[in-house]
Image (spheres, rainbow, N blue to C red):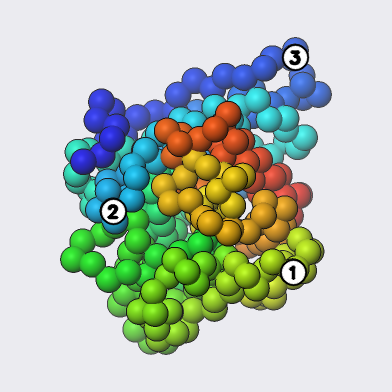
Amino acid sequence: MNTISDQPLFAPAPEWTGRDDGPGPEHARWHSVVQPLPADGAASATDAAVLIGYASDEGVLRNGGRQGAAAGPAALRSALGGLAVHDSFPRFDAGTVTTQNDDLEGSQAELSRRVGDILSNGNLAVVLGGGHETAFATHCGAFRGNGEQPLKIVNLDAHFDLRTADRATSGTPFKQIAEFVQNACPDQPAAFDYSVFGISEANNTAVLFNTADELGVETVLDEDLMDLGPSQAAGLVAKSVQDQPAIHLSIDLDVLPAAAAPGVSAPASLGVDFAKIRAMALAVAATGKLRLVDVVELNPDFDVDDRTAKLAARLIADIVATHASAHA
């Protein structure tokens, strides 16, 4: 059962709040520049960053995790609101999709439809999760919005999320995506192109590593990144996405060390430090080919002084700014 039960399947963008230092672009912060997406939908926004929330943790429950990620979108908006903005790139808020009771599949279909509409007008979709069940819905929508052409996936995560299960969970999204893409593009054997950085060998069984091998997944362990500097880590990702026409970046906040990011569904015992995760994410954004980014598994119930929310907000703000620069 989803932990948020008093919201409709879809709700329009909430009012943003934050520090107000005065009028004018020199005082711009996220809360002062984000505009609600008008009722006519994504057609009103072109070449913009369009945020959409996904208040869901039913998938986390199904996966045996600690719930609370359904409150992630509100916490991310709150942490983003006061961050300064130094460009004129348009930013819109398309509202929030909420899983109704245990109907995960219904909310995934709704989120997928809305993400597809966002991408179809050339926008960058920024999805505020939510458990990692978010990624299956967003990728299916992005596939449609990208003219039914495959997207390269870069996942910054301690877990493969390639589990096989009777129904969708937060541990199955990339296995589901593999099946979806292979069915949608039967004449393209390499249509499922998935790279994951930050994998914890201790937290993924041999079955999952075997599944990754069978699917041709590029795997980089957390320990492989330990001795690299941020620029070296960014170089690995840049090489992975080179010449890719469209990219889906998924960031599971449990890739960060638990001491830095305690507010997640499944804390990492080792993790990858923030400077490297940020550098890798910005390497993707700098290509100008990023179409979709989802930030997932923020669990405010377990956060300390909003540390995790603030790190996630900084990632989102920097990704959007770097994407804007690439499109200037």
Q: Nearer the viewer, residue 125 or 209?
A: 209
Residue 14, quarter of picture: top left
Q: Which mark is residue 21?
A: 3
Q: Is residue 328 above or below residue 243?
A: above
Q: Is residue 293 visible?
A: no
Q: Nearer the viewer, mark 1 or mark 3?
A: 1
What is the secondary structure assignment of the residue under circle 1? loop
Disc 1 to disc 3: CB gap under 8 Å: no
**Residue position marked by numbered label 2 in the rendering:** 64
**Residue position marked by numbered label 1 in the rendering:** 227
Q: Is residue 28 visible?
A: yes
Q: Quick one: quadrant of the N terminus?
A: top left
Query: From the viewer's perspective, is 275 left or right of 51?
Result: right
Q: Nearer the viewer, residue 73 or 45?
A: 73
Of the residues shown, which amino acid type is indicated by label 2?
Gly
| Disc 2: CA contacts within 10 A as few (<14), some (14-19) or many (>=20) | some
Q: CA distance from mark 2 to mark 3?
A: 45 Å
What is the secondary structure assignment of the residue under circle 2? loop
Of the residues shown, which amino acid type is indicated by label 1?
Asp
Q: How many discs mark residues in the rendered view?
A: 3
Q: CA distance from mark 1 to mark 3?
A: 42 Å
Counting from the top left corner in percent of width and height, residue 68 is at: 37, 38
